[in-house]
Image (cartoon, helix red, strand yellow):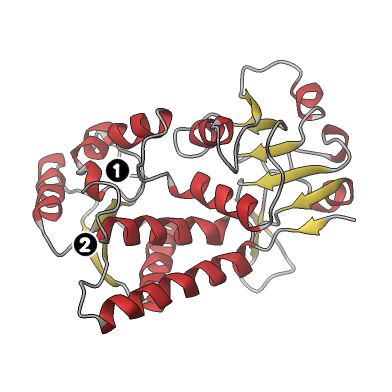
Amino acid sequence: MHQVIDGKKISEQIQSEIAAEVAVIKSSGGKVPHLAAVLVGNDGASETYVNGKVKACEKVGFKSSLHRMENSVSENDLLKKISDLNNDADIDGFIVQLPLPKHINVPKITEAVSPAKDVDGFHPVNTGRMLQNIPCYLPATPYGIMLLLERYKIETSGMHCVVLGRSNIVGLPVSVLLERNTYPGNCTVTVCHSKTKNIPEITQTADILITAIGKPEFVTADMVKNGAVVIDVGITRIKSSETKSGYRLIGDVKFDDVAPKCSYITPVPGGVGPMTITALLKNTLAASRKEIYK
């Protein structure tokens, strides 16, 4: 019998733990953690994500600020804004919401953020520290996945983990974290991507399958072995006559087919998604305490 991994419930648990820590900071007259976000343009999905982050900050007692910039903003003006946030002592961490307009060089922007305030975990310094297992800010979605595995006490040591997707945001970092000599970790990891041959044969050998390719319902029951743990990071909006909005969200996994074969599985929505913001809050709390960059 499969168990559905409830990301919403776990994220609420962790957020209430963070709120309790913030209450202690406030009562002792300490500095309240402050997370800032830079939002360029008015991309609908980005608006939704940033609003979710602002609400989560309010919920746990953080201070938050939103810095909006026009879609036509020059790269230099955006770099100046980042420099101002780097130098603002009240801001502990900040994110530059992706995607950015085509005329802006994303790696240049990523590198302009101070590693000590890079609570998204995208700066090459944080990535390098992650590779060497030195304390750093972990990218939020992979960190959220690790927190789910830990809270559900899912055995990872010696397991074969297959990751579908090799993005810098999810696939690559989660493969690194699962190989580490720690818990969760100590997996033997295989990363599959668009050039991989015989993907179904490889996924059938996975004790833990993590999908992050954004191909709706790509993973079917015949690709999953009995008793596997399936973590679905994919999220695609499709038209639906069954919902008020006219859309519904589905993952990379054909949930109803695959779930009966699993020991644990994440739903979409309500699985990995809520954990991403929670991981960002954990990074911001660590930043405010100067736990990583003293």
Quick one: 16 or 100, which is closer to the camera?
16
Q: Is residue 191 left or right of residue 118?
A: right
Quick one: 292 or 128, which is closer to the camera?
292
Residue 267 image offset from top left, x and y in percent? 71, 57
Residue 21: which numbered mark, if any? none
What residue is drawn where x is 71% and y is 49%?
A: 154
Say which of marks 1 and 2 sits in front. 2
Residue 101 image offset from top left, x and y in percent? 29, 43
Label 1: state its secondary structure.
loop
Badge 2 crowding class, 10 Å Cα cut-off, few under 14, some 14 to 19, many 20 or more, is: few
Q: Amino acid at mark 1?
A: Pro
Give residue 108's quadrant in the image: top left
What residue is drawn where x is 16% and y is 40%?
A: 75
Residue 8 image offset from top left, x and y in percent? 60, 67
What residue is drawn where x is 65% and y is 39%?
A: 211
Residue 67: which numbered mark, if any? 2
Which circle's residue, 1 or 2, is located before the other in the chain? 2
